[in-house]
Image (cartoon, rainbow, N blue to C red):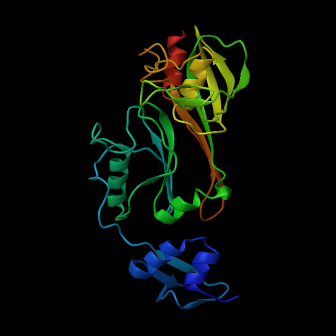
Amino acid sequence: MEKKVQDFLRDEAGMSRRMVKGLKKSGGFFRNGAVVSHYDTLSPGDVLTVEFPAVDTLPAEPEAAPLTVVYEDEDILLIDKPVGMVTTPSCQHPHGTVVQAVLHHYALQNWRQTVHPVTRLDRDTGGLLLIAKHPYSHSLFYKEEAGLRKGYIALVEGTMERKHGRITSPIARAQDSIIKREISAEGKSAVTRYEVLEEMEGKTLVSLGLETGRTHQIRVHMASIGHPLTGDTLYGTGPSAWSEGQALHASFLQFTHPWTKEKMSFRSVPSFYPKARKLSG
Protein backbone atom coordinates (compact mmCIF):
# COMPACT_ATOMS: atom_id res chain seq x y z
CA MET A 1 0.00 0.00 0.00
CA GLU A 2 1.41 3.37 -1.03
CA LYS A 3 1.74 6.18 1.52
CA LYS A 4 3.09 9.70 1.56
CA VAL A 5 6.33 10.10 3.47
CA GLN A 6 4.72 12.24 6.18
CA ASP A 7 1.86 9.75 6.64
CA PHE A 8 4.28 6.82 6.88
CA LEU A 9 6.32 8.59 9.56
CA ARG A 10 3.21 9.33 11.64
CA ASP A 11 1.28 6.09 11.10
CA GLU A 12 4.02 3.46 10.83
CA ALA A 13 7.06 4.99 12.50
CA GLY A 14 5.12 6.54 15.39
CA MET A 15 6.51 10.05 15.02
CA SER A 16 4.55 12.92 16.52
CA ARG A 17 3.12 15.64 14.29
CA ARG A 18 5.51 18.09 15.92
CA MET A 19 8.52 15.94 15.07
CA VAL A 20 7.41 15.47 11.46
CA LYS A 21 6.84 19.22 11.18
CA GLY A 22 10.39 19.84 12.38
CA LEU A 23 11.77 17.40 9.83
CA LYS A 24 9.84 19.12 7.03
CA LYS A 25 11.45 22.42 8.03
CA SER A 26 15.06 21.42 8.72
CA GLY A 27 15.54 17.70 8.10
CA GLY A 28 15.83 15.57 5.00
CA PHE A 29 14.07 12.60 3.38
CA PHE A 30 15.67 10.11 1.00
CA ARG A 31 13.79 7.39 -0.90
CA ASN A 32 16.18 4.67 -2.05
CA GLY A 33 19.01 7.18 -1.73
CA ALA A 34 17.34 9.99 -3.70
CA VAL A 35 16.06 13.19 -2.12
CA VAL A 36 12.26 13.38 -1.81
CA SER A 37 9.77 15.68 -0.09
CA HIS A 38 7.32 14.84 2.67
CA TYR A 39 4.53 14.79 0.05
CA ASP A 40 6.20 12.15 -2.11
CA THR A 41 4.85 8.60 -2.09
CA LEU A 42 6.45 5.44 -0.75
CA SER A 43 5.73 2.05 -2.29
CA PRO A 44 6.25 -1.40 -0.72
CA GLY A 45 9.98 -2.23 -0.85
CA ASP A 46 11.15 1.38 -0.80
CA VAL A 47 13.85 2.31 1.73
CA LEU A 48 13.24 5.61 3.47
CA THR A 49 16.15 7.39 5.16
CA VAL A 50 15.46 10.32 7.49
CA GLU A 51 18.12 12.93 8.23
CA PHE A 52 17.56 14.74 11.52
CA PRO A 53 18.51 18.43 11.62
CA ALA A 54 21.76 19.28 13.34
CA VAL A 55 21.42 20.94 16.74
CA ASP A 56 22.32 24.64 16.66
CA THR A 57 23.15 24.97 20.35
CA LEU A 58 24.71 22.16 22.33
CA PRO A 59 23.79 21.71 26.03
CA ALA A 60 27.45 21.90 27.07
CA GLU A 61 30.94 22.17 25.66
CA PRO A 62 32.33 18.81 24.48
CA GLU A 63 35.19 17.50 26.60
CA ALA A 64 37.58 14.66 25.80
CA ALA A 65 37.31 11.96 28.45
CA PRO A 66 37.66 8.17 28.53
CA LEU A 67 34.39 6.62 27.38
CA THR A 68 33.78 2.88 27.46
CA VAL A 69 31.37 2.18 24.60
CA VAL A 70 29.56 -1.14 25.00
CA TYR A 71 27.35 -0.80 21.92
CA GLU A 72 26.56 1.90 19.37
CA ASP A 73 24.59 2.35 16.16
CA GLU A 74 22.90 5.32 14.48
CA ASP A 75 20.08 5.35 17.05
CA ILE A 76 21.53 4.47 20.45
CA LEU A 77 24.73 4.56 22.49
CA LEU A 78 25.37 2.28 25.46
CA ILE A 79 28.29 3.08 27.74
CA ASP A 80 29.77 1.62 30.93
CA LYS A 81 29.85 4.66 33.21
CA PRO A 82 32.68 4.79 35.73
CA VAL A 83 32.07 5.48 39.41
CA GLY A 84 32.46 9.16 40.30
CA MET A 85 31.29 10.55 36.94
CA VAL A 86 28.23 12.81 36.96
CA THR A 87 25.78 12.31 34.10
CA THR A 88 24.76 15.91 33.35
CA PRO A 89 26.59 19.22 33.97
CA SER A 90 25.43 21.46 36.81
CA CYS A 91 26.68 24.38 38.88
CA GLN A 92 28.27 21.89 41.28
CA HIS A 93 29.74 19.77 38.46
CA PRO A 94 30.40 21.96 35.40
CA HIS A 95 33.03 19.65 33.87
CA GLY A 96 33.92 16.00 33.49
CA THR A 97 30.39 14.73 32.92
CA VAL A 98 28.97 11.96 30.78
CA VAL A 99 27.12 14.47 28.59
CA GLN A 100 30.32 16.35 27.77
CA ALA A 101 32.26 13.16 27.05
CA VAL A 102 29.47 11.92 24.76
CA LEU A 103 29.32 15.26 22.93
CA HIS A 104 33.05 14.91 22.25
CA HIS A 105 32.45 11.36 21.04
CA TYR A 106 29.73 12.70 18.71
CA ALA A 107 32.03 15.42 17.40
CA LEU A 108 34.59 12.83 16.33
CA GLN A 109 31.81 11.26 14.22
CA ASN A 110 30.57 14.61 12.92
CA TRP A 111 27.28 13.89 14.65
CA ARG A 112 25.83 17.18 15.88
CA GLN A 113 23.02 16.12 18.19
CA THR A 114 22.33 16.53 21.87
CA VAL A 115 22.48 13.77 24.48
CA HIS A 116 19.24 12.02 25.51
CA PRO A 117 19.81 9.72 28.53
CA VAL A 118 17.26 6.89 28.62
CA THR A 119 18.51 5.54 31.95
CA ARG A 120 20.18 7.54 34.71
CA LEU A 121 22.80 6.72 37.33
CA ASP A 122 23.99 8.60 40.41
CA ARG A 123 27.54 9.94 40.39
CA ASP A 124 28.80 7.10 42.61
CA THR A 125 26.91 4.35 40.78
CA GLY A 126 28.76 2.80 37.85
CA GLY A 127 27.55 0.56 35.07
CA LEU A 128 25.39 0.43 31.98
CA LEU A 129 23.95 3.77 30.87
CA LEU A 130 21.74 3.96 27.78
CA ILE A 131 21.61 7.10 25.62
CA ALA A 132 19.37 7.88 22.63
CA LYS A 133 21.29 9.63 19.86
CA HIS A 134 18.38 11.69 18.53
CA PRO A 135 14.91 12.79 19.72
CA TYR A 136 13.04 10.12 17.74
CA SER A 137 14.77 7.11 19.28
CA HIS A 138 14.45 8.78 22.68
CA SER A 139 10.68 9.11 22.27
CA LEU A 140 10.31 5.45 21.29
CA PHE A 141 11.82 4.28 24.59
CA TYR A 142 8.82 5.71 26.41
CA LYS A 143 6.38 3.48 24.57
CA GLU A 144 5.26 0.23 26.22
CA GLU A 145 7.03 -1.98 23.69
CA ALA A 146 10.44 -0.64 24.76
CA GLY A 147 10.59 -3.50 27.30
CA LEU A 148 13.24 -1.78 29.42
CA ARG A 149 14.55 -3.99 32.24
CA LYS A 150 17.39 -3.08 34.59
CA GLY A 151 19.37 -5.15 37.04
CA TYR A 152 21.92 -4.15 39.67
CA ILE A 153 24.61 -5.72 41.82
CA ALA A 154 25.36 -4.28 45.25
CA LEU A 155 27.58 -5.03 48.21
CA VAL A 156 25.64 -4.57 51.46
CA GLU A 157 26.53 -4.61 55.12
CA GLY A 158 25.96 -7.73 57.19
CA THR A 159 24.89 -11.29 56.48
CA MET A 160 21.32 -11.60 55.27
CA GLU A 161 19.10 -14.23 56.85
CA ARG A 162 16.68 -14.28 53.95
CA LYS A 163 18.53 -15.16 50.75
CA HIS A 164 15.93 -13.63 48.47
CA GLY A 165 12.95 -11.37 48.91
CA ARG A 166 10.82 -8.45 47.80
CA ILE A 167 10.81 -5.08 49.57
CA THR A 168 7.58 -3.12 49.12
CA SER A 169 7.90 -0.17 51.51
CA PRO A 170 6.73 3.17 50.02
CA ILE A 171 9.32 5.95 49.71
CA ALA A 172 8.96 9.70 50.27
CA ARG A 173 11.29 12.67 50.44
CA ALA A 174 12.66 13.15 53.96
CA GLN A 175 11.08 16.16 55.65
CA ASP A 176 14.40 17.70 56.67
CA SER A 177 16.22 17.26 53.35
CA ILE A 178 15.81 17.96 49.64
CA ILE A 179 18.12 15.06 48.79
CA LYS A 180 17.45 12.28 51.27
CA ARG A 181 14.55 9.83 50.96
CA GLU A 182 12.89 7.71 53.64
CA ILE A 183 10.33 4.98 54.17
CA SER A 184 6.93 6.57 54.70
CA ALA A 185 3.33 5.37 54.62
CA GLU A 186 2.54 8.60 52.72
CA GLY A 187 5.23 7.90 50.12
CA LYS A 188 4.99 6.55 46.59
CA SER A 189 4.86 2.80 46.01
CA ALA A 190 8.26 1.18 45.54
CA VAL A 191 9.20 -2.44 44.92
CA THR A 192 12.71 -3.93 44.95
CA ARG A 193 13.60 -7.60 44.45
CA TYR A 194 16.86 -9.00 45.81
CA GLU A 195 18.79 -12.28 45.80
CA VAL A 196 22.00 -13.17 47.62
CA LEU A 197 24.90 -14.00 45.30
CA GLU A 198 27.81 -14.40 47.69
CA GLU A 199 28.63 -13.91 51.37
CA MET A 200 31.92 -12.38 52.49
CA GLU A 201 33.38 -11.20 55.80
CA GLY A 202 30.43 -9.36 57.29
CA LYS A 203 29.14 -8.32 53.88
CA THR A 204 26.85 -9.75 51.21
CA LEU A 205 26.87 -9.45 47.43
CA VAL A 206 23.30 -9.23 46.10
CA SER A 207 21.57 -8.89 42.76
CA LEU A 208 18.65 -6.49 42.61
CA GLY A 209 15.74 -5.80 40.29
CA LEU A 210 13.41 -2.81 40.29
CA GLU A 211 9.69 -2.89 39.67
CA THR A 212 9.50 0.87 40.23
CA GLY A 213 12.00 3.68 39.78
CA ARG A 214 12.02 5.92 42.85
CA THR A 215 14.97 8.18 43.70
CA HIS A 216 17.57 6.28 45.79
CA GLN A 217 15.19 3.30 45.86
CA ILE A 218 17.78 0.54 46.27
CA ARG A 219 19.78 2.49 48.84
CA VAL A 220 16.70 3.34 50.92
CA HIS A 221 15.17 -0.14 50.70
CA MET A 222 18.33 -2.04 51.63
CA ALA A 223 19.00 0.32 54.55
CA SER A 224 15.40 -0.16 55.71
CA ILE A 225 15.93 -3.90 56.23
CA GLY A 226 19.19 -3.38 58.10
CA HIS A 227 21.61 -3.96 55.22
CA PRO A 228 22.70 -0.57 53.83
CA LEU A 229 25.01 -0.44 50.86
CA THR A 230 28.70 -0.57 51.70
CA GLY A 231 30.24 2.89 51.36
CA ASP A 232 26.90 4.71 51.39
CA THR A 233 27.48 8.05 53.15
CA LEU A 234 23.78 9.03 53.09
CA TYR A 235 22.02 5.87 54.25
CA GLY A 236 24.86 3.73 55.55
CA THR A 237 27.96 3.86 57.71
CA GLY A 238 30.08 6.03 55.42
CA PRO A 239 33.20 5.58 53.26
CA SER A 240 34.65 2.09 52.91
CA ALA A 241 37.85 0.55 51.55
CA TRP A 242 35.64 -1.93 49.70
CA SER A 243 34.30 0.57 47.19
CA GLU A 244 34.38 4.10 45.82
CA GLY A 245 31.10 5.63 46.94
CA GLN A 246 28.17 3.31 47.53
CA ALA A 247 28.82 -0.20 46.21
CA LEU A 248 26.09 -0.22 43.57
CA HIS A 249 26.48 -1.14 39.91
CA ALA A 250 24.04 -1.21 36.97
CA SER A 251 25.02 -4.70 35.84
CA PHE A 252 22.20 -5.71 33.48
CA LEU A 253 20.16 -3.92 30.84
CA GLN A 254 17.59 -5.35 28.47
CA PHE A 255 15.46 -3.45 25.98
CA THR A 256 13.83 -3.63 22.58
CA HIS A 257 15.74 -1.62 19.99
CA PRO A 258 13.61 1.44 19.18
CA TRP A 259 13.80 0.94 15.42
CA THR A 260 14.86 -2.61 14.55
CA LYS A 261 12.65 -4.06 17.35
CA GLU A 262 15.44 -6.52 18.19
CA LYS A 263 15.52 -7.59 21.85
CA MET A 264 18.96 -6.69 23.20
CA SER A 265 20.60 -7.47 26.54
CA PHE A 266 23.95 -6.51 28.04
CA ARG A 267 25.88 -7.23 31.24
CA SER A 268 28.65 -5.44 33.11
CA VAL A 269 30.83 -6.51 36.06
CA PRO A 270 31.12 -4.05 38.97
CA SER A 271 34.53 -2.62 39.72
CA PHE A 272 34.10 -3.27 43.45
CA TYR A 273 33.52 -7.02 43.01
CA PRO A 274 37.15 -8.13 42.49
CA LYS A 275 38.21 -5.69 45.22
CA ALA A 276 35.61 -7.18 47.53
CA ARG A 277 36.85 -10.71 46.85
CA LYS A 278 40.45 -9.65 47.48
CA LEU A 279 39.67 -7.82 50.72
CA SER A 280 37.62 -10.73 52.01
CA GLY A 281 40.76 -12.86 51.79
Q: Is residue 159 left or right of residue 19?
A: right
Q: In terms of image quadrants, where is residue 46?
A: bottom right
Report the front residue among 139 and 278. 139
Give coordinates of residue 67: x percent, y percent.
39, 45
**The N terminus, quarter of image:** bottom right
Q: Which residue is drawn at 51% across and 57% down?
A: 76
Give coordinates of residue 216: x percent, y percent.
52, 31
- Residue that sits furthest to the bottom in the current view: 40
Depicted 217 relative to depicted 26: above or below: above
Depicted 269 relative to depicted 70: above or below: above
Q: In terms of image quadrants, where is residue 263?
A: bottom right
Q: Residue at x 46, y 27 (%)?
A: 180
The answer, for residue 199, to whether it is visible in the render is yes
Q: Residue at x 38, y 78 (%)?
A: 26
The answer, for residue 269, to whether it is visible in the render is no
Q: In terms of image quadrants, where is residue 182?
A: top right
Give coordinates of residue 100: x percent, y percent.
32, 49
